[in-house]
Amino acid sequence: MLVKKILKKILIKICRIAGFEIIDQNQFTFPSLKNKKFNDLSTVNKKSIVMPLGKVEISRKIEKLSIIVRTNSNVHISDQNKKRIFNRDKEEYIERSLNSLVVSINSFKKKFNKFQIYLTIVDQSDNEKMSLKFDEIFSKLDFKPTIIAFDKNELKSEINVDFNKDVYGNLSSLLKCFKIGKESDGDLIFFLEDDYLHKKTLIEEMVLTYERISSQTKRDLILLPSDYPFLYMEDRSTNVLAGSHRHWQTLDKILCSFLISKKMLEIYWDNFLLTCTSHNNPIEKHLNEICKKEICLSPIPSLSLHMANSNSIFGISPYIDIQKEWENNKN
């Protein structure tokens, strides 16, 4: 038995030097990876392993992620007169959304504690109750987020939309987030809205998938966190790629929650400005132009659930137990 263990250790070392990993097919464990779980084989900035597709050496390394979330408890659904699923006050959607984001950040940081994450909240609520909620929710993080009380007057001269309409506030806060992203220290920028519920693995999968697919394609990407219904409402061509834990499909249009590299944000800065300076139809018209030139992907199944109207083609993702996710993200 002792000889067997010694020989096993020697074999593991030889295989690792040669660039291979060992699989024990009887127990389906990975001795050379300290018996890691089936879906927990990848390492940030080093390698991505997906069974049985093998290993991808990471050439597109990521060390910093900036997350920018815009919140507004005063507007239920911008530019619409529809009810959201569960028909609750807007504050509750914001609270559960941020709770789920904090859980995901902490889960990722527990595995990869040297990875730097920055969190910025751009808030239009002007609400003391909301401020207290922020304090409570973000006390669970091991770092202090930046909370900006945003006044839409700040960018009035740059936006050609009626100041009194809800869409103006939507575009002004979006422009503020884009500007913060452009000036941020993150290698990747993750723009999020306040009405999404996030899976625990959201941050881990977004980062590891970006590294894996970007290293394979030698290109920067745009990743959406949600599997929107509109992707299945018409006949269209798509490619399906393997991410770190699930499949991802290519798409040619996006919404305003997405992850992008700072480099790509700078290259297409004019598109980001044009998105906010006028009321386009759809709002994402100039962002969709980027998707015609670059690789844009969304997960199958979804990593984030858009808590919009139940009949919206931009709303809740198919094949997800939304009631369960809602209950799981109480504060």
Image: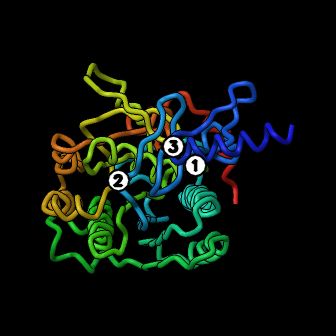
Quarter of the image with the N terminus is top right
Residue designated by label 1: 201
The residues bearing labels 1 and 3 have C-alpha atoms spaced at a distance of 8 Å
Q: Secondary structure at mark 2?
A: loop
Q: Secondary structure at mark 1?
A: loop
In this picture, residue 269 sits left or right of residue 55: left
Q: Is residue 186 above or below residue 148?
A: above
In this picture, residue 82 sits left or right of residue 330: left
Q: Observer-nearest residue: 160 or 38?
A: 38
Q: Are marks 1 and 3 in contact (CB under 8 Å)?
A: yes
Residue designated by label 2: 59
Count residues near mark 3 (Cα–Cα under 10 Å), then give few for <14, some for 14-19, many for 20+. many
Residue at x 49% of width, y 70% of height = 116
**In the image, which is nearer the foreground, mark 2 or mark 3?**
2
**Where residue 207 sits: x, y (%)?**
45, 53
Residue at x 16% of width, y 61% of height = 267
